[in-house]
Amino acid sequence: MTGLTSSRKLDHLTLCAETDVAFGDAGFSDVRLVHNAVPECAVSDIDTRTVFLGRELAAPLFLAGMTGGHPDTAEVNKTLAAAAERFGIPMGVGSQRAALENPELEDSFTIVRDTAPSAFLAGNISAVQLRDHGLEWAERAVSMIDADALCIHLNFLQEMIQTEGDRSAAGVLETIREASRELSVPVIVKETGSGISREAAAALYNAGAAAIDVGGFGGTSWAKIEKARASDKTHQLLGDTFLEWGIPTAVSVFEVAQVRAGPVIATGGLKNGLDAAKALALGADMAGMALTLLPDALKGYDALFSRIETVCTELKTAMFLTGAQNISALGKVRYYLTGTVREMTNK
């Protein structure tokens, strides 16, 4: 039996797969890495390995949380998990709320650990649900997939436009503080399309967040998605009015990196390995993709594996052309900023 939350998860996946749900510019077109005409290395010398929250990974690429919570989402989660295992990269699942409300839906999540026994996996629960249900829900989310970390997501723009949304953020910081202190795994705090400012990042790190995923503007637009789902005029108009709300991903990465007290994950509108390289140069430690990979994930293993191979090749190419032989060196390469990103960062 599926409920309202489960049906909403399938609505979200269907909309993402079948309609154009992206909106805005993540800002990476305003970032230009400085070309090194004498890189003094061979492509075969490029090392993309990195360490994230104590785990060595083959590349700084994160399969960002996409789905789960409905029987029809299990197959795509299995495909994504197979890619995480194959490429030695981390994966996050979509919100686990539906399965926490109804354990009969856990299979769409447990399939991830079954498929990727050695991958770094991150669970996912909203800050509001965690506040309302307590740490017991968080630990259940972790144990459901034997997670290595738990993403606590912030999605207040989506909640405002969603007809059935939660509209109180009171107590969220204290909830994150308690979870960071008491949970059995590290906490990753993630936005879902509106970005994180330097002030918010400082507060979240101070509350104990082990890592921050900026989830910036320019990728999947939850304002657009919830507008499409809304049946009443008020929420449809809200979706229109706030369609351009948020901090572009490139700007958010730049700001959060200035106050970092833990890893920074860049998600929101990254389209290829060059965008990933730019994010890392701006200060990110990991580059996450969701919507960009979803069409290939829905096609199956071969399509998704091929796309990730391409992303890895693009990342290595950017590293070679900047003379960065490893991820640490990529974080130090020089870049130019133009347009909106330059204006917003005052750089």
Image (tube, rainbow, N blue to C red):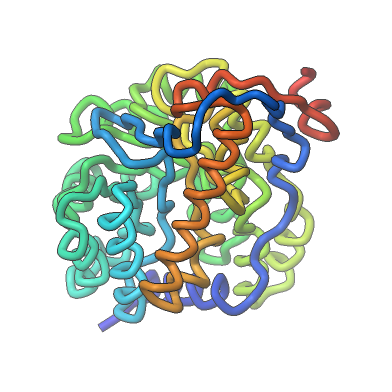
Q: Splitting the image into 4 quarters, where does residue 231 fall?
A: bottom right
User: How far across and how far down the image is residue 136, in percent?
Assistant: 17, 46
Task: Indicate the quadrant containing the N terminus: top left, top right, bottom left or bottom right.
Answer: bottom left
Q: Height in image: 296 above or below 113?
A: below
User: How far across and how far down the image is residue 240, in percent?
Assistant: 77, 61
Outermost residue toward the bottom in this view: 1
Q: How many numbered discs sit on the rendered protein?
A: 0
Identify which residue is drawn at 23% across, 46% down.
138
Identify which residue is drawn at 63% across, 72% down.
230
Drawn side of residue 223 relative to residue 340, left or right: left
User: How far across and how far down the image is residue 262, in percent?
Assistant: 39, 22
Drawn side of residue 329 relative to residue 229, left or right: left
Identify which residue is drawn at 60% across, 58% down.
220
User: How far across and how far down the image is residue 260, in percent?
Assistant: 47, 18
In front: 43, or 214? 43
Q: Height in image: 45 above or below 99?
A: above
In front: 62, or 331? 331
Drawn side of residue 138 relative to residue 152, left or right: left
Identify which residue is drawn at 56% across, 23% down.
40
In front: 139, or 315? 315
Task: Indicate the quadrant containing the C terminus: top left, top right, bottom left or bottom right.
Answer: top right
In front: 181, or 31? 31
Can residue 170 be seen from the camera position used here?
A: no
Drawn side of residue 105 relative to residue 169, left or right: left
Can residue 259 be seen from the camera position used here?
A: yes
